[in-house]
Image: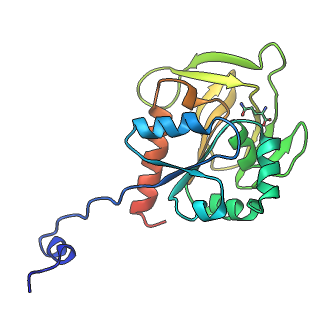
Amino acid sequence: MPPTKELSRTLYNHPMPPAPLTIGVLALQGAYDAHASVLTTLGVTPLLVRTPDALAQVDALIIPGGESTTILKFLERDHFFDALSDFVHTKPTFGTCAGAILLAKQVANSTQRSLDALDITVERNAYGRQNDSTILSEGTSLPGGPLEMVFIRAPRIARLGPGIDTLASRNGDPVLIRAGHLLAATFHPELSNDTRIHQLFLDMVNASKISGQ
Ligand code: GLN
């Protein structure tokens, strides 16, 4: 009998091709379509996640910006909060703006429930009326020069827990951070033409798949 594909790979030491990744985008409210387009640009087919069943099919998740109070209401109404909380505690998740607020352990202005996964305190709508929506270009620790950052009624990360890496800041406030399997931005990378942040997230997802997490 000829060796199976798997066996011949083992025999001849050919690595298995990586299984295609399924990246979900939480699609209850907010800028989920723009994230889905960036993923498509990067060659990944996104899955719009609206139910716990859909969540069970994805390797990783993006929680978009929007209005965190509204997303929270939908999560609670649809009995989706607990499944999402379990997911984000172990699987790669990228939260942008309202998504970062939902991932935080503590939310201020005003206090609200959150998924309690990322050890930060975020202050909602923290940049004041005049400055609450703005586009800046800032350096990051990623290669490729300054990054355009679109802030829309952005939260401020007021406290960072231990072991969290800051990849970019705005006037000293962290705006792009990473903690293990979690990535969070207080701005909207999906609204700029620069795909570096999404690529970084895909690299994190690939690395966690290879290490079997
Ligand atoms: N101000 C929104 C909130 O508190 C976040 C804004 C955004 O996601 N662009 O949820």
Question: Which residue occupies the foreground of this view, 42 or 168?
Answer: 42
Q: Say which quarter of the image contains residue 90.
A: bottom right
Residue ranking furthest to the top: 130
Ligand 1 falls in which quarter?
top right
Residue ranking furthest to the bottom: 1
Q: Position of residue 29 (x, y in %)?
A: 71, 41
Residue 142 versus residue 111 in the image, above or below = above
Q: Relative to residue 176, is residue 119 drawn left or right? A: right
Image colouring: rainbow
Q: Position of residue 2 (x, y in %)?
A: 8, 81
Badge count = 0
Q: Position of residue 40 (x, y in %)?
A: 43, 39
Q: Relative to residue 19, is residue 33 drawn left or right? A: right
Position of the N terminus, as image quadrant, is bottom left
Q: Say which quarter of the image contains residue 143.
A: top left
Q: Residue at x 50, y 20 (%)?
A: 146
Q: Residue at x 63, y 50 (%)?
A: 163
Question: Which residue occupies the foreground of this view, 45 or 139?
Answer: 45
Q: Residue at x 44, y 21 (%)?
A: 145
Q: Position of residue 154 (x, y in %)?
A: 74, 28
Residue ranking furthest to the left: 1
Q: Relative to residue 205, is residue 8 drawn left or right? A: left
Residue 22 versus residue 139 in the image, above or below = below
